[in-house]
Image (cartoon, rainbow, N blue to C red):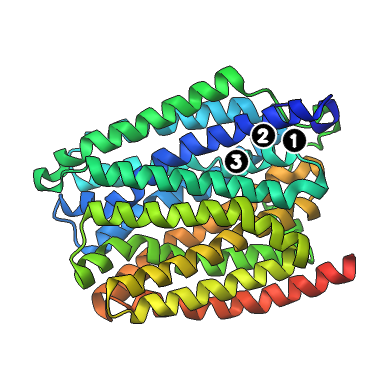
Amino acid sequence: MSDPAHLATPAEERRALIVLLSVIFLMIAGFGLVIPLLPFFAKAFNAPAWQVTLLFSAFSFGQFLGEPFWGRLSDRIGRKPVLIITIAAVALSYAALAFAPNIAAAFAIRFVTGLFAGNISTLQGAMADITPPEKRAARMGLMGAAFSAGFTTGPAIGGLLAQPSRGALGFQLPLLVAAGFAIASTLAVVIFVRESRPDPANHRPHRPRIEGLKEALAHVVIGRILAISFIVVIGFAGIEATYGLWTQARFGWGPRQIGLAFMMIGLLGAFCQGWLSGRLVRRYGEARTLTGGLVFMGIGLVVQGISPVWPVAILGFACVCLGQSICFPNLTTLISHAAPPDRQGEMLGLNMSGMALARIGGPVFAGWLFSSVAPGAPFASAALLILPGLFFAAQVRQRVHALA
């Protein structure tokens, strides 16, 4: 990849895009393979529900610390070296998790995994680097489609390879396959990715993280986007952490059914982000499309929470996926438009860090709701959190309209 100013032909720009999307697909396929299996992996160590959700929180705590660091470092030294370091470390952590002797070791490994997996803002920065401003909404949608395609492939493979009857040993093979995906992604970066960071001569001096956070929160658009991301992800992360437990309690599902469900939803997400999102943005704009995505997420969460049979639950899951697919790419696009070119990695990193912070508390709270209130309580909580998200989205729409 290279800076847009140095892309001599549309063919070079297209090749850079294909390479980056391939790297994202391989990385997320490994991540998606692991996520649906974690509740069953933890239960193989006889972990109660609150410890199951802590596996998700440990990862998110590491990601919270890693995102702004890797984002700022990629602004300074380049996207490529940061991607090589982080993805290679994730591969090692998946292999280590396959041989975790107990739940305490699994917590520590998940924290380290999150620390190095906090590179999403670096990937987003690389995408913004190679994309002209007028194409960013569509390209972020393609990036989301690559994420969804990875989530389609990973869970299906994980569900087929897992053998929960063997206890923790039954999860070694899928975890090692996840490590293989990360290794393939690392090699793709080493061999094919060209540096895309803007000219370092134009980069501003390093500044404390708190100054960047103050600037982001004071910004009329970025500050509200950060609020939406944080609020909505608290609820969504809780659903993600308890979904395996909920489907097992409600419908008697195991890893295979969970993997197939994620595969189906991943296909829908790839379609929505790769084709639908860009068209909606061209017609309605990023801010209005963001609002529509939040509405669909709220409807889907309510349908899932009250679903009497699994087909209705899948319908609700599909609505959530549709809403997320047209919501989250536009959060990223709005930040990339509002941030200065040499601060994009930092601002996108702050957004991902805020989302990671939400993923620390969200699973813990959802685990408590699941165990102490009702299995469906996390869905009700997540649906209620959509309301303040809609309030901030309305403010973003007003500010974007006023700045246009």
* Residue drawn at point x = 55 percent, y = 33 percent: 22
Q: Which residue is mark 3?
A: 69
* Residue drawn at point x = 30 percent, y = 47 percent: 107
Labelled pair 2, 1 in contact (Cβ < 8 Å): yes
Q: Which residue is mark 1?
A: 130
Name the one closer to the observer, 196 or 366: 196
Q: Quadrant of residue 250?
A: bottom left
In screen coordinates, is 167 left or right of 325? left
In the depicted structure, whether residue 50 falls above or below residue 33: below
Q: How many marks?
A: 3
Q: Spatial distance from mark 3 to mark 2, Cα to Cα?
A: 25 Å
Q: Which residue is mark 2?
A: 17
The crowding category of the residue bearing disc 1, from other C-alpha atoms within 10 Å (few below 14, some 14 to 19, many at least 20), is many
Please provide percent x and percent y for residue 350.
Answer: 63, 52
Q: Quick one: SS at disc 1? A: loop
Which residue appears farthest toward the left when viewing the image? 165
Please provide percent x and percent y for residue 90.
Answer: 42, 34
Residue 356 seen in the figure:
no
In the depicted structure, whether residue 306 falls above or below residue 332: below
Please provide percent x and percent y for residue 11.
Answer: 75, 27
> What's under tag 3, amino acid-wise?
Phe
Q: Spatial distance from mark 3 to mark 1, Cα to Cα?
A: 22 Å
Residue 99 seen in the figure:
yes
